Amino acid sequence: MAKWKDNLIVKLLLGVIVGIIVGLYANEQVIGVINTIKFLIGQVIFFIVPLIILGFITPAITKMKSNASKMLGTMLGLSYSSSVGAALFSMTAGYILIPKLNIVTAVEGLKEIPALIFKVEIPPVVSVMTALVLSIILGLAVIWTNSKKTEELLDEFNEIMLSVVYKIVIPILPIFIASTFATLSYEGSITKQFPVFLKVIVIVLIGHYIWLAVLYLLGGAISGKNPWNLLKYYGPAYVTAVGTMSSAATLPVALSCAKKSNVLHDDVADFAIPLGATTHLCGSVLTEVFFVMTVSKILYGSLPSVGTMILFVFLLGIFAVGAPGVPGGTVMASLGIIISVVGFDETGTALMLTIFALQDSFGTACNVTGDGALALILNGIFKKNLAEKN
């Protein structure tokens, strides 16, 4: 997992650099060709997005039933609540801070991008929201009817879509990014907004640490234990997550860190840490929400409405459950709602993919470290059951 992510990051960075250089020196005819390429690749990606939703969200729902227990339901509820809470915190910060960043909107004093040379539209089989609702209903129906054959079929479809992502989406992403940054560079957006992106990344990192503090304080209050006696062991897991950009690759280290503490029951650590690696994405979600608002302000001149952002936040919490299995992380899994709910076009989507990927390691580190806090909360909720078991 870490290898392909390292590869992807390098390719995305090259795409950004090449795109900016080409955009600075290209004439109108060259940019017209590049803009056409960007449009065509965007059409392919947007065609695949609803299929990714069906391929990952539905199997994720059907797999929950085999471990249907109080502790599982509680952990899933905690993971979703933490992700949504982090997203709401990020949204609030966005409305307060982004207007103070002196962002020059993309409509002011920029070159006009040439028209497409030709236009071939590739409509998705179903809309994004249709795919989401279908995924939820189909997943629940499989659980209710205990349909083994359909579940196996969905698992196969999951493998098919994973292959599509690896063999189609990942290879064309760097070209999509390069063409997008070429057009942004040509029109002048990048040179004007680069300092803003640096500020936003710093703000997001501070947000990660604030949210982790909130989670560990809650964990301490609910469990009656000193949260520092767990958090102080998480340094190696945090560093590993930054290096690997993968919750799965960090899992052995995270488990080792959690078990060094005397405030967690071993059974809780063995259960909550691996499950949290799959379902708890507070850092990634916090990052994505702030980036979505920033990109909206930069490209479209205004922040999304409060109603739009609240809908986006609560849907994002659902998409986060399936995100770890999708190359590209949370933002890849949630492309559908970025497009359909927030209304991003090809340029906005490409910009989101790029800036999210460039800081993905720190979002993953926040996710992994936050798993310990959720385990501490779970320990407190079930401490009577654990005491009886002993």
Image (cartoon, rainbow, N blue to C red):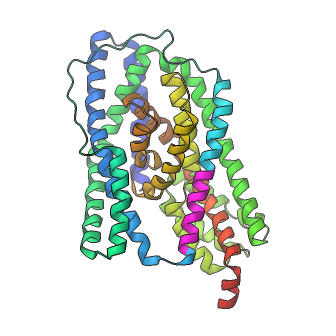
Which of 170 and 306 lies nearest the eye of the viewer? Answer: 306
Q: Is residue 96 visible?
A: yes
Judged left or right of residue 257, residue 147 is: left
x, y percent for residue 238: 62, 56
Image point (51%, 53%), residue name: 317
x, y percent for residue 161: 28, 54
Q: Which quarter of the rendered picture does the C terminus lie within?
A: bottom right
Quadrant in the picture for residue 180: top left
Residue 82: say if magenta. yes
Magenta span dominant secondary structure:
helix
x, y percent for residue 382: 66, 78
Image point (42%, 21%), residue name: 184
Which of 174 and 157 lies nearest the eye of the viewer? Answer: 157
Count of numbered marks? 0
Image point (56%, 43%), residue name: 310
x, y percent for residue 130: 33, 48
Image point (54%, 36%), residue name: 291
Residue 4: say if magenta. no
Which of 178 and 316 lies nearest the eye of the viewer? Answer: 316
Q: Which region of the structure is painted magenta?
A: 72-85
